[in-house]
Image (spheres, helix red, strand yellow):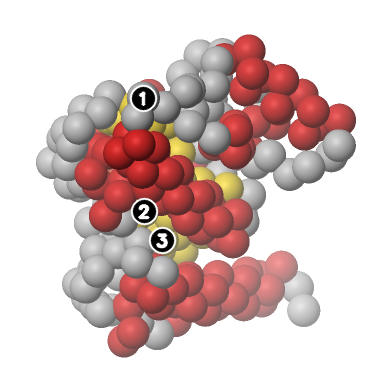
Amino acid sequence: MNLEQETPVRWQNAAVEIAEYGRRLITDGLAYGTAGNLSCRVDDHVVISPTSIPYEEVRPHDLWVLSLDGEVVQEGSVSPSSETRFHLGIYAATKAAAVVHTHSAEVVAVSATLENLPAIHYSIARLGGPVPVVKYQRFGSASLAAGIQEALCYPGRPRSAAILQNHGAVTYGSSLREAYDKALMLEWLARTYRLALQIGEPRILTTEELDEVTAEARRRRYAMGAAARHQ
């Protein structure tokens, strides 16, 4: 099989994976209805979920294939995700291989009340440290995409997760599995922080303590994710 024949097969494989993880968004409580979206980068193309189709009904042929500039290469059904703009922005600014956007309850609660999710547990180092809350902008807008890009590419401390004010969250990784695992972790961290606040004033890890965690993880060759590797 030559490269020209192989590429559509890889798009199909990515579409199958996205459809499977889309169904998990609902069962894992990371989204409801048709909220949220997922994408994968395949070389110079992006395979992205469609808009307005319940995840349990999404099939691989419903997904869209776009160039990194947003040009349609292969049509799916309905329209591509309304958040295509920020997916493409993340691929342009990072080495992401996959992006996951969620509307999970604990994270949305954080988004409406805090300026960032602090380091309540050392596992947050895998996301690059405390997770910033991007100021509210309308979904699908260029300003939202720009805000996400700025938050993820903060000089000296890049991150692989951002929380969107009164909206949800976005994570990226070197695979769809990694990006999705980070979304699950982010929801767990948000819940843990809320529970801690109900008990008393939580102790928050310092930057130095998080740097020590990252260094030790590297020494032990633990997978810390894209953001930690690029620090």
- Mark 1 and mark 3 lie on one chain; the one further toward the N terminus is 3
Residue 3's image quarter?
A: bottom right
Q: Residues within 10 Å of mark 3 (few under 14, many from 20)?
A: many
Per the image, the residue denoted by label 2 is 101
Q: Is label 1 in contact with label 3 (beta carbons under 8 Å)? A: no
Residue tagged by mark 3?
A: 38
The C terminus is located in which quarter?
A: top right
The residue type indicated by label 1 comes to Glu
Asked whether residue 84 is in view, the answer is no
Q: Amino acid at mark 3?
A: Leu
Q: Position of residue 16 (x, y in %)?
A: 52, 79
Picture disc at residue 201: 1
Q: Which residue is painted at 60% across and 39% down in the image?
A: 123
Which residue is nearer to you in this view: 168 or 151? 168
Closer-to-camera residue (200/137): 200
The CA span between labels 1 and 2 is 30 Å
How far apart are the two marked residues, 1 and 3, measured between alpha carbons? Answer: 36 Å
Element marked by disc 1: loop
Disc number at residue 66? none
Amino acid at the residue labelled 2: His
Quarter holding residue 166: top left
Residue 51 placement (x, y as % from top left): 24, 68
Q: CB atoms at circles 3 and 2 under 8 Å apart?
A: yes
Q: Residue at x 59, y 76 (%)?
A: 13
Q: Is residue 29 left or right of residue 138?
A: right
Q: Residues within 10 Å of mark 2 (few under 14, many from 20)?
A: many
Q: Nearer the viewer, mark 1 or mark 2?
A: 1
Q: Residue at 49% of width from left, 28% of height from top?
A: 119
Identify the mark nearer the N-term, 3 or 2: 3
Label 1, residues with CA under 10 Å away: few <14, some 14-19, many ≥20: few
Which one is earlier in the sequence, the residue at label 1 or at label 2?
2
Residue 106 visible (yes or no)? yes
